Image: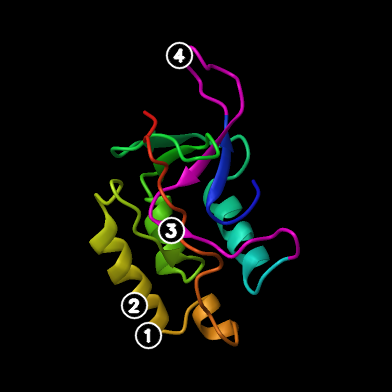
Amino acid sequence: MTDGDTLVVSPLEGRRRGREQRVRLIGLDAPENLPRPRCWARESTSALLRLAPRGSTVTLAFDRRRFDDHRRQLRYVWTASGEFVNARQLAEGNAFALRVRPNVAHAEEFARLERRARAARKGLWGSCPDPGPPSPAPRPSATPRS
């Protein structure tokens, strides 16, 4: 795990079975840990690790675009108990909502969760002096990969 919006998974079946792959959570952007941790980066990463600890089973689902420009899988993630990880990170104030077309199936829900976390001063909203998106929104590649 590199930050609060990226997991490393090893599929249990299929042609990629057992091979670690990076998964970028769709619809959010967490504060970056590198090159040096931004405000709330460690807390966001820890929260994601508590939701989806190493060795746990998660369910992944894609939207329209399956990979980003860094060849990370773009996915929605649920825990074995059915908790929607992407939504929980936003609801707890561990990330910013990020709308990148064409992966917008949950965009309205995610924006609503960010607004509520911000109003309640949860997570980064109550702890960071000037919370703002950690980096410019990623731009989709000219030729989406699937």
Secondary structure category for the residue under label 3: strand
Name the residue rendered at 40%, 35% in the picture: 59
Q: Amino acid at mark 2?
A: Arg
Q: Is residue 95 left or right of residue 42?
A: left
Q: Amino acid at mark 4?
A: Gly
**Decide: marks 3, 4 in contact (CB < 8 A)?**
no
Residue on which the image places disc 3? 28
Q: Nearer the viewer, residue 77 or 41?
A: 41
Name the residue rendered at 57%, 60% in the picture: 47
Q: Amino acid at mark 3?
A: Leu
Residue on which the image places disc 2? 116
**Decide: marks 1, 2 in contact (CB < 8 A)?**
yes
Span shown in magenta: 10-36
Q: Amino acid at mark 1?
A: Ala
Whole-percent x, y for residue 94 in the image: 51, 67
Whichever of labels 3 and 2 marks the residue nearer the N terminus, that label is 3
Instruction: Please identify the dominant SS of the magenta region.
Output: loop
Whole-percent x, y for residue 32 in the image: 63, 61
Whole-percent x, y for residue 68 in the image: 46, 40
Mark 4 nearby-residue class (10 Å; few <14, some 14–19, many ≥20): few
Residue on which the image places disc 4? 14
Which mark is on residue 119? 1
Name the residue rendered at 28%, 70% in the picture: 112
Q: Is residue 112 magenta?
A: no
